Amino acid sequence: MDTFFTELGARVLERWKRENFSLEKFPEIARTALEERLPSEHVNLSTFIEEFLLNDDQPLQTQSGFGQPELVAYDHPRFYIQILVWMDGTTDIHQHEFSGAFHVMSGSSIHAHYAFEKSQAVTPHLHMGQVSMQSIELLETGRTVPIVSGPSCIHSLFHLDTPSVTVVVRTQNDPGMNPQFNYLPPHMAVDPMFHDTLTMRRKQLLDLLAQMEVPGYGALVMKMLEDLDFERGFYLLQHCMGQLGELGGFEAALGLFESKHGQLAAGVSATLEEGLRRDNIKNMRGTIAEPEHRFFLALLMNVSTRADLLTLVAQRFPDEAAIETVMRWALELEEYSEAGLSVLDAVFPEDWEIDGAEHSNLFQAALRHFMLGGKKLPKSLSALSKAQSQALQALFAASSLRVLVV
């Protein structure tokens, strides 16, 4: 067992015992203990991994799939200390059924806090409401953050560096804090631990039919949506939306779902659309290794306003004007393919009668213009008609760059 974490666990246990194991006081006890001897300054990750691999005397390990991987460094019946390694990790927006504190031992993350308001329970496992971001910050190596169980602490982490390593001092679980909801902005909360095995098998069968290209896939999904309750209907719609989109049947399926469930379904379309946007950025992250560009993706995924995005850029890169930093990234991320010139998922229209050599200049000039909120076209965009300028703005607004131009 690692001496540092054994001593840390003993220190937490002694102080918590003096407080009669108060759950309310545990987050502050954990935070204080972590900050007295920062793991980021006293633990060598390579040495810890080697000892973990070669020494059988280790705490009981969980079967959790959280982390890449999760290592339990100290275990007690009431709490434990885990080390979470993240190679390419982005957590869902979530709350916790446990309390404690986490410490950034290595790397950095974008950390966003949310609120869930106007909550309406559809079932014990699915609620409708309003997910809204409350704050966003950059967490760098050495930071320690308390964790409070329940819906008062809803957050997400987008890990920027490879690897990022987090030390968590946490209770086993806090009574009455189930389910540990995940949040799907802007309108839903779902229980990720709830498993409807019949729905799971039906999804698998539908995937099989899609792979076999069996005719009537869309009609079959429509028949299911006519019969299913809201919860199972939503999960079916969410699962099938990609295949339905390819077949041209998604809008009809969504319309049927909304007609069947009325006002209760009012937020479903926006939630599914936002889920696609976030998944798209996650997928792009898998092809981008440059740390600055990964930071840019984290901001595009999580930040809700241009002002907040530029503030975080200025915080991380203070030696360059924030707008110039973003424009530099946009230029570095340009790619040419058979589809034409693109910046991430924003693709310059190839059918415009404009010299291809000018596409980059116009793309960059248009992005800068819209970021600055300008209305009158500058000389740099004189080659574009008003309709083309509006089309470019709509193109940016429909892409992952949306927060920069709206």
Image (tube, rainbow, N blue to C red):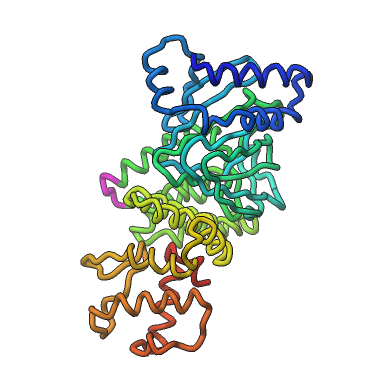
From the viewer's side, name the closer residue of 50 and 102: 50
Magenta highlight on residue 245: no
Relative image position of residue 140 (x, y in whole percent): 53, 45
Count of numbered labels shown in the rendering = 0
Q: Is residue 135 above or below residue 390?
A: above
**Most distant residue in the left direction:** 338
Q: Position of residue 337 (x, y in %)?
A: 22, 65
Residue 331 picture location, percent across and down: 34, 68
Answer with left or right where residue 312 lies relative to residue 53: right
Residue located 54% across and 66% down the image: 306
Residue pictured at 63% horizontal, 16% vertical = 10
Pick whichever, 27 or 93, lies toward us. Answer: 27
| Residue 218 visible, this angle | no
Task: Specify start and end residues of the magenta stretch as a single range.
Answer: 211-215
Seen in the picture, residue 95 relative to 357 is either above or below; the reply is above
Q: Looking at the image, which residue sits at the far top?
A: 57
- 274 horizontally vs 46: left or right: right
In the visual, does 331 lie left or right of 160?
Answer: left
- Residue 7 locus on image (x, y percent): 59, 17
Foreground: 286 or 318? 318
Quick check: is 212 in the magenta stretch? yes
Q: Nearer the viewer, residue 10 or 278?
A: 10
Which secondary structure class fits the magenta region best? Answer: loop
Vertical side of 56 occupied by 171: above or below: below
| Horizontal relation, residue 21 to residue 396: left or right | right
Q: Which residue is rendered at x = 66% and y = 32% of the image? A: 31
Report the residue at 57% width, 64% height from top: 305
The reply to whether residue 78 is visible in this rendering is yes
